[in-house]
């Protein structure tokens, strides 16, 4: 799941003082203080080829005083950078621009593939006792924890093929995204200094997201936990530590115990969509019903989410859906996590048909949608071709102002309306 790792890397909260936040370290019962099902051999990632460039050598040399100021010893520093050169393949990846966005139904089919369900379902039983304790400790639904694990690394099946120090040093030396990756690199060295992992096992994505739950180093320092009580926060080889760290991350970002992430619903014919948030009882009074026939009741509020517009499935999503997005700020990702978790525990597939005849907008067309909305005074944030919640809100407002079906969806019909309407 390299693209997800990249999104997490670029979306993590790098501005906080990560060194000042203490970790939460609950202890699992003795029987749960176990390693993964079999010890993993050290990763075979490369530290580099040839010799480092003069600029890279100068960067590594100049970094030492800051690492020392953070408590990193010279021996740890030298071991971390031994044989490391810049990775030109990573530099090339930073310059790639995605021109095509996979339709949500294809994304979801990949997220909840038969192979992933086949791999993940036995994991729900194997780690049931650990998940019991995690759920009691953090109040986070195990289904969502399992969904994150599955989406990020296919339940630990692939945690990345890059040496994290090399990846971060490459990005930091190139000053990609300013000082963000330099700070992440320094934090990664602190993690090595504290002995949570050895350099040989510090594997991750090309953007530096690490371990079975794909934490950036700064997120590791804030949210990773030593759930097994062995003195290390090991998100690489300890499944209990990795799952508990995910639960802690979600809890610290506002997860509300007992509140569902959401569910698929049916709406009455001619239903007037909108962006409002209402109680479950209020939605029920408007004729909204769950597709599984269960009552639409309980405490909490929700809003409508139409990932493919009014022609596709409709969901009610809660504040916990937004908490999942703190892991990766993507509606499709959050839906993938949530739906995967549900399916692992016997939930049904999405019931309403997807509008598979719909042709997704190209990147330049999505940017054109944003430019049209911005020119009309709608706040869409940066014009970047990404249809996130801010752009969806603007689309809702524009559609309502024109008496259109207000579903917040960017498609060819919306673009045609924007081109015609002045």
Image (cartoon, rainbow, N blue to C red):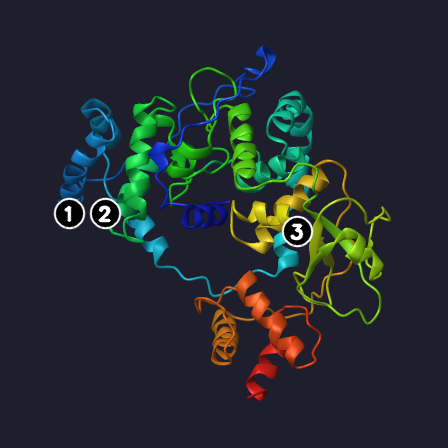
Residue contact between numbered discs 2 and 1, judged by CB atoms under 8 Å: yes
Task: Give me the C-alpha separation between circle 1 and circle 3.
Answer: 44 Å
**Disc 1 designates what residue?**
55
Q: Residues within 10 Å of mark 3 (few under 14, many from 20)?
A: few
Q: Quadrant of the C terminus?
A: bottom right
Say which element carries label 1.
Answer: helix
Q: Quadrant of residue 138?
A: top right
Q: Earlier in the sequence, mark 1 or mark 3?
A: 1
Question: How many callouts does the rendering have?
Answer: 3
Residue 331 is situated, as x and y percent measured from the top left of the image, at 59, 55
Say which element carries label 2.
Answer: helix
Q: Residue at x 30, y 39 (%)?
A: 185
Q: Quadrant of residue 200?
A: top left
Please state which of residues 161 and 11 is positioned toward the viewer in this rendering. 11
Task: Give me the C-alpha separation between circle 2 and circle 1.
Answer: 8 Å
Task: Give me the C-alpha separation between circle 3 and circle 2.
Answer: 38 Å
Q: Residue at x 38, y 36 (%)?
A: 217
Let me know if residue 177 appears in the view.
yes
Q: Quadrant of residue 114?
A: top right
Of marks 3 and 2, the one in the foreground: 2
Say which element carries label 3.
Answer: helix
Q: Earlier in the sequence, mark 2 or mark 1?
A: 1
80 horizontally vs 241: left or right: left
Q: Residues within 10 Å of mark 2 (few under 14, many from 20)?
A: many
Position above or below: 333 against 391: above
Position above or below: 62 against 77: below
Q: Residue at x 29, y 53 (%)?
A: 176
Residue 88 is situated, as x and y percent measured from the top left of the image, at 28, 49
**Disc 3 designates what residue?**
109
On residue 173, the disc is 2
Let me know if residue 46 appears in the view.
no
């Amino acid at each position: 799941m390299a693209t997800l790792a990249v999104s997490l890397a670029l979306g993590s909260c790098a501005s906080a003082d990560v060194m000042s936040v203490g970790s939460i370290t609950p202890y699992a019962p003795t029987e749960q203080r176990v390693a993964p099902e079999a010890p993993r051999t050290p990763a075979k990632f490369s530290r580099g080829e040839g010799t480092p460039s003069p600029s890279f050598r100068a960067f590594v040399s100049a970094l030492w005083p800051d690492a020392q100021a953070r408590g990193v010893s010279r021996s740890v520093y030298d071991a971390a950078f031994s044989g490391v050169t810049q990775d030109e393949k990573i530099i090339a990846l930073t310059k790639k621009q995605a021109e095509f966005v996979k339709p949500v139904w294809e994304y979801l089919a990949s997220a909840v593939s038969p192979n992933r369900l086949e791999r993940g379902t036995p994991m729900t039983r194997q780690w049931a006792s650990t998940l019991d304790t995690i759920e009691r400790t953090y109040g986070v639904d195990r289904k969502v924890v399992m969904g994150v694990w599955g989406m990020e690394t296919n339940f630990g099946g692939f945690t990345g093929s890059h040496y994290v120090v090399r990846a971060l040093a490459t990005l930091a030396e190139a000053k990609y995204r300013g000082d963000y990756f330099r700070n992440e690199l320094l934090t990664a060295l602190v993690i090595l200094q504290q002995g949570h992992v050895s350099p040989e096992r510090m594997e991750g994505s090309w953007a530096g997201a690490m371990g079975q739950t794909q934490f950036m180093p700064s997120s590791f320092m804030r949210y990773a936990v030593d759930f097994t009580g062995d003195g290390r926060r090991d998100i690489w080889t300890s499944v209990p530590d990795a799952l508990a760290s995910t639960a802690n991350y979600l809890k610290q970002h506002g997860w509300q115990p007992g509140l569902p992430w959401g569910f698929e619903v049916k709406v009455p014919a001619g239903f007037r969509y909108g962006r409002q948030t209402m109680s479950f009882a209020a939605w029920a009074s408007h004729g909204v019903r769950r597709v599984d026939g269960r009552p639409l009741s309980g405490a909490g509020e929700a809003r409508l989410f139409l990932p493919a517009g009014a022609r596709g499935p409709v969901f009610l999503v809660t504040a916990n859906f937004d908490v999942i997005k703190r892991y990766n700020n993507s509606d499709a990702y959050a839906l993938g996590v949530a739906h995967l978790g549900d399916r692992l525990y016997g939930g049904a597939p999405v019931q309403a048909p997807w509008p598979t005849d719909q042709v997704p907008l190209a990147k330049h067309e999505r940017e054109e949608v944003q430019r049209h909305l911005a020119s009309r005074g709608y706040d869409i944030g940066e014009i970047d071709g990404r249809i996130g919640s801010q752009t969806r809100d603007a689309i809702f407002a524009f559609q309502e102002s024109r008496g259109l079906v207000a579903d917040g969806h960017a498609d060819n019909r919306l673009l045609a309306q924007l081109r015609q309407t002045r």
